[in-house]
């Protein structure tokens, strides 16, 4: 089963709460990459919207691990995602366990973006089926999530600052992963 077939319907037994696909249930354009961005219990609706925009612009689908720190309803999605929500697909997972079940079923590698990693993001070889995971804006991810990650990477920053905006960090790592896979080799449309 391809990603195109799994979006837009509930997959029994996998713990996926719901999936959304395009405007008024119509399919979104097929993603240009099989990479995924995963948000672990996002806290800030505006960051969710910015992540939708990033996914739309770079052709990458999103995985949302609930519960969210804000109601993830149609009104908020429309407000935060603006018209970009029509150009990106995202899937909602009921909880961490449901997401892990999906990861295993899909045979994907989980790459955690964290300031606590020793490995710098630009020194990693990314695969086409990697999932780039970011934690909550307020607290990151718990130790159980860190242990489940196949790889943890950090963006080098100067002291004394401690972190970038979540969407900025994902954009940097996603850009490097897509560059490695030749996503930017052709002229933009």
Image (cartoon, grey):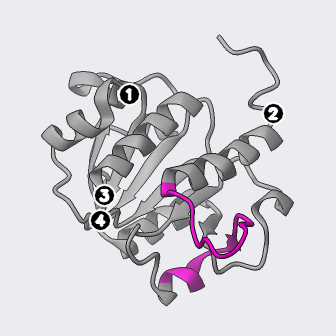
- Provide the secondary structure element on which disc 4 rests: loop
Q: Do tag 4 and tag 1 residues touch (Cβ < 8 Å)?
A: no
Which residue is at the far top?
189
- Provide the secondary structure element on which disc 1 rests: helix
Q: Nearer the viewer, mark 4 or mark 3?
A: 3
| Residue carrying label 2 | 182
Q: Do tag 3 and tag 2 residues touch (Cβ < 8 Å)?
A: no
Residue 177: x %, y % from top left: 73, 47
Residue 51: x %, y % from top left: 44, 45
- N-terminal of the pair, mark 4 or mark 1, is 4
Q: In the figure, 12 relative to 143: above or below?
A: above
Identify the mark at residue 66; answer none if there is no mark: 4
- Left or right, 113 with respect to 158, comes to left
| Residue carrying label 3 | 44
| Label 1 CA crowd tier, 10 Å (few <14, some 14–19, many 20+) | some
The residue under the point 75% across, 52% down is 127
- Provide the secondary structure element on which disc 2 rests: loop
Identify the mark at residue 84; answer none if there is no mark: 1
């Amino acid at each position: 089963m391809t990603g195109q077939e799994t979006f837009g319907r509930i997959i029994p037994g996998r713990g996926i709460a719901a999936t959304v696909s395009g405007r008024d249930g119509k399919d979104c354009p097929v993603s240009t990459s099989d990479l995924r961005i995963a948000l672990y219990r996002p806290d800030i609706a505006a960051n969710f919207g910015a992540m939708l925009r990033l996914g739309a612009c770079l052709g990458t689908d999103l995985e949302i691990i609930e519960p969210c720190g804000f109601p993830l309803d149609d009104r908020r999605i429309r407000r935060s995602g603006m018209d970009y929500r029509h150009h990106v697909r995202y899937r909602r997972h009921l909880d961490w366990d449901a997401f892990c079940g999906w990861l295993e079923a899909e045979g994907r590698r989980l790459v955690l973006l964290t300031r606590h990693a020793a490995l710098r993001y630009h020194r990693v070889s990314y695969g086409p089926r990697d999932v780039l995971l970011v934690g909550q804006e307020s607290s990151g991810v718990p130790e159980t999530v860190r242990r489940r990650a196949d790889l943890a990477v950090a963006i080098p920053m100067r002291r004394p600052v401690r972190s970038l905006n979540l969407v900025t960090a994902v954009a940097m790592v996603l850009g490097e992963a897509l560059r490695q896979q030749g996503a930017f080799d052709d002229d933009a449309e």
